[in-house]
Image (cartoon, rainbow, N blue to C red):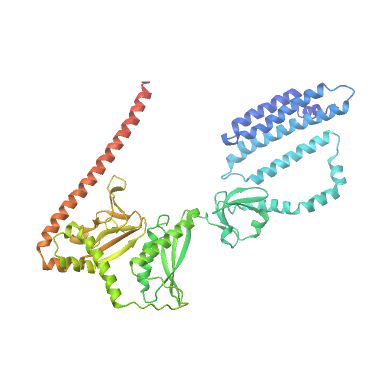
């Protein structure tokens, strides 16, 4: 009996008509599948080729060997049916089901449906081969029980995977935490019927069984939005007013790259202890994989802000160290600092005509500040009454103009100064000055210069002339930057248009 012919005649098809239909389904599949999934059409084509090969081999088998011929015919039928099943399944999934779903079908569901289709094909092949599937399952009940017990863990992972895929608590690309330990945080890379693969911040892939995930309390840091709250704890002396600390710490966290502006950073007084007042600095991020880098940058900015404000982080109260310093040593150290500030002030052209006693007085009242890399020292549009002298490091001067992106006007190194217009006239800052590297500056306040100008009014005229020269120089730099930017944009646009003209006229 030719089992293949019987089955095909049952569908109203001839043998070669079925082969042609299977080939057409492979061609249709190539057109239906997206480009990134077209490799899946290879399996039905290979199965169809194997059908043709086994059928040809069956034709050339001698008449006195019916067993081999029957095996080849059954194999030929199986290959053809598997080719039909695979092509039909892929066409149905991609051409019908996927177009009606708002989100991709989970891979585990597609695999399970494909397995059910293959099981149906196997049962059909066994039936036409003369094997009764029901009796086969009855006689193998003991074997089925043994296999079921041995695959208990695997089946548990499969059903847990089905539950996870149905509920969809996370998707590939989401950051999740599946335990209480910090190293149990990772980005979902792959989800399948047995386990979920996550990649930790250490770039280590971890494979977590579905059953374990189903029993764990999952945290998804990517839903319902990528905005995640982070925090740091900072100790401060109890005698510092809380409102001052809150403003200082919030401003330090707000300017860190990666910290979201909305919701803004917030500072809360957490508790009092023998070490001091404990503050919680809370901020929000959207780039979760950089959470540790951003947290480190926030802590650095907090350190620099507290250092500039003269607020020391109190150490744990475990031991008392008494170090006696004589007044002579303190006076010597203070004199050295004043001399260094005086040398820096003499390099400022605005004060070149100041007498020595006035210069000495300014140096004594000036202060030193330390800024972190990338931190803004002054901001464009803000009000201030200080002049800054770069003592160590480098700063860059930036301006924002209408119709232009952020323009870098200059970079200033040791000995350079900025902020003189706000110091002398009270005008808002005309540029933003930001530290390139760790930068130490000397700050001169308005209240330090006021008595000198009152005592020597003619100095105001000399300083005003210097200010006019500096203002003209700044205007020329802005104009030059604008002219260069406009020239580059025109040249780039001209090149694009020239290429389009050549293409249109085939030049």
Residue 190 spot, x, y in % from top left: 60, 47
Looking at this view, name the residue that lies furthest to the right.
64
Q: Position of residue 145 (x, y in %)?
A: 82, 51
Judge whether 212 appears above or below 499 on screen: below
The mark tally for this picture is: 0
Q: Where does the image place residue 320, in percent across and percent down from the top left?
A: 43, 78
Quadrant the C terminus occupies = top left
117 with respect to 232 (left or right): right
Task: State the residue in front, 97 or 267.
Answer: 267
- Using the rendered view, name the quadrant where residue 217 is placed: bottom right
Q: Is residue 396 found left or right of 77 in the rendered image?
A: left
Kindly give the residue lying farthest to the left in the view shown.
458
Give the position of the N terminus as an image quadrant: top right
Is residue 479 something one can see in this rendering?
Answer: yes
Depicted 240 relative to depicted 468: above or below: below
Residue toward you, 72 or 377: 377
Q: What residue is rendered at 29% in x and 55% in y?
A: 433
Q: Residue at x 24, y 46 (%)?
A: 478
Can residue 13 be seen? no
Q: Position of residue 351 (x, y in %)?
A: 17, 60
- Image quarter for residue 395? bottom left
**For the point 72% across and 51% down, which residue is it?**
154
């Amino acid at each position: 009996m030719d089992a293949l012919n019987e089955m095909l005649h049952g569908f109203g098809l001839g043998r070669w008509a079925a082969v042609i239909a299977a080939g057409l389904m492979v061609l249709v599949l190539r057109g239906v599948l997206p480009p990134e999934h077209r490799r899946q059409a290879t399996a039905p084509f290979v199965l169809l080729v194997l059908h043709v090969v086994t059928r040809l081999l069956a034709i050339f088998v001698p008449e006195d060997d019916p067993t081999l011929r029957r095996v080849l015919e059954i194999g030929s039928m199986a290959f053809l049916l598997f080719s039909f099943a695979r092509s039909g399944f892929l066409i149905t999934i991609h051409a019908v089901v996927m177009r009606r779903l708002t989100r991709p079908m989970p891979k585990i569901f597609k695999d399970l449906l494909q397995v059910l289709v293959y099981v149906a094909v196997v049962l059909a092949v066994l039936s036409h081969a003369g094997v009764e599937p029901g009796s086969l399952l009855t006689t193998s009940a003991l074997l089925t029980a043994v296999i079921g017990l041995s695959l208990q863990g695997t089946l548990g992972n499969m059903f847990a995977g089905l539950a996870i895929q149905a509920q969809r608590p996370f998707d590939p690309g989401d950051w999740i935490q599946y335990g209480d330990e910090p190293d149990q945080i990772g980005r979902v890379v792959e989800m399948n019927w047995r386990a979920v693969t996550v990649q930790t911040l250490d770039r280590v892939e971890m494979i977590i069984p579905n059953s374990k995930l189903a029993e764990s309390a999952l945290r998804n840091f990517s839903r319902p939005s990528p905005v995640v709250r982070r925090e740091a704890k900072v100790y401060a002396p109890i005698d510092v007013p809380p409102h001052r600390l809150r403003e200082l710490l919030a401003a330090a966290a707000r300017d860190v790259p990666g910290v979201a502006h909305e919701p803004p950073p917030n500072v809360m007084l957490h508790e009092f202890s023998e070490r001091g007042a404990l503050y919680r600095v809370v901020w929000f991020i959207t780039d979760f994989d950089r959470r540790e880098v951003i947290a480190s940058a926030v802590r650095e900015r907090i350190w620099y802000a507290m250092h500039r404000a003269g607020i020391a982080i109190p150490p744990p109260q475990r031991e008392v160290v008494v170090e006696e310093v004589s007044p002579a040593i303190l006076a010597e150290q203070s004199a050295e600092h004043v001399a260094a500030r005086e040398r820096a002030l003499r390099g400022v052209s605005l004060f070149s005509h100041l007498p020595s006693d006035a210069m000495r007085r300014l140096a004594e009242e000036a202060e030193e500040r330390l800024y972190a890399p990338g931190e803004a020292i002054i901001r464009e549009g803000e009000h201030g009454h200080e002049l800054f002298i770069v003592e160590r490091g480098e700063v860059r001067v930036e301006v924002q103009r209408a119709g232009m992106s952020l323009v870098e006007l200059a970079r200033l190194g040791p000995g350079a100064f900025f902020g003189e217009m706000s110091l002398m006239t009270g005008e808002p800052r005309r540029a933003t000055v930001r530290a390139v590297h760790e930068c130490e500056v000397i700050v001169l306040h308005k209240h330090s210069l006021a008595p000198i100008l009152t005592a020597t009014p003619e100095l105001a005229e000399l300083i005003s002339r210097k200010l006019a020269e500096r203002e003209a120089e700044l205007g020329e730099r802005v104009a030059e930057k604008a002219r260069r930017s406009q020239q580059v944009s025109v040249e780039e646009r001209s090149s694009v248009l020239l290429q389009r003209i050549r293409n249109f006229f085939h030049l």
